[in-house]
Image (tube, rainbow, N blue to C red):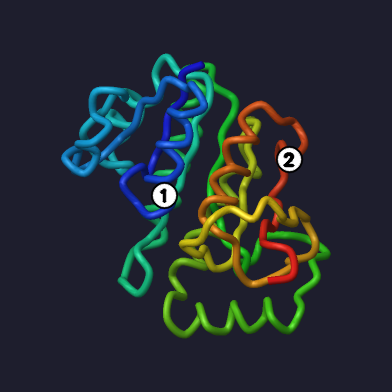
Amino acid sequence: MKITIFGSTGFVGKVLINKALTAGYQVKTLARYPEKLEDIKDTIEIIQGSIFDPLKVEAAIAGTEAVLSTIGPPPGKPCDPQVYEKAMEDIVRIMDKNGIKRYIHIGGAAHEGGENENWTFNRRFLRFFLNLFSKQILVVKYLEWEVLKKSNLDWTLVRPPRIANEPASGNISADEIMLNSLKISVEDLTDFILEQIASKEWIRKAPLVSSIGK
């Protein structure tokens, strides 16, 4: 199966693309700086370009069966949320054009967009912290989710809290209403994302995914 991965040079994306290759997927990716993928360049198809360029996005997803995205604004740096909203609209439009339905994207545990969710003290604290230092990320992820809700894609929005550089525990919670804890390891998170390619459990849903009891 051939898939596209956006964000493959980032913290989560690097782990995800290597796991996808180990699992036997053929991978296309979009990278502004392909040299960051030097160690695996012979095992993947790289399109040089930006997520904000629709022509490059189409080149990256053409001929694939699923698209995975770890794209997001850099923490603590200014950004224009509408630019990310437009990029999501372009992805939806291009996937529709190419007849690709499955889309898995990373959101966050602290942004709005859900209904009847349990906002525990810890989750409210997480939102308060991000409002102070990375408020635009919350806006971006909210806007992206709103675009997905209006689409016809088989999307899943994976919403983690803090992503820790730790080994997999294999012990995670995925729930639309309740965030179990304030962190998840990057290994567990990427395992969960890859599992969604074939799973129908979370289609058109946005699970809060975290380690259990951490």
**Disc 1 to disc 2: CB gap under 8 Å:** no
Q: Position of residue 111 (x, y in %)?
A: 60, 67
Observer-nearest of 111 and 30: 30
- Asked if residue 7 is positioned above or below residue 137 in the image, the reply reads above
Looking at the picture, tell me which residue is in the foreground, 143 or 170: 170
Kindly identify the residue that appears in the image at 43 percent across and 51 percent down: 12
Secondary structure at badge 2 equals loop
| Helix, strand or loop status at disc 1 | loop
Label 2 neighbourhood size at 10 Å, few (<14), some (14-19), many (20+)?
A: some
- The reply, left or right, for residue 103 in relation to residue 91 is right
Per the model, the C-alpha gap separating discs 1 and 2 is 20 Å
- Quarter in which the C terminus is drawn: bottom right
Report the residue at 74% width, 31% height from top: 200
Q: Amino acid at mark 2?
A: Trp
Q: Which mark is residue 202?
A: 2
Residue 50 % position (x, y)? 26, 41
Task: State the image quarter where residue 181 is shown.
Answer: bottom right
Q: Which mark is residue 207?
A: none
| Residue that mark 1 sits on | 71
Based on the displayed image, in which of its 4 quarters is residue 56 positioned? top left
Residue 125 vertical placement versus 69 (above, below) = below
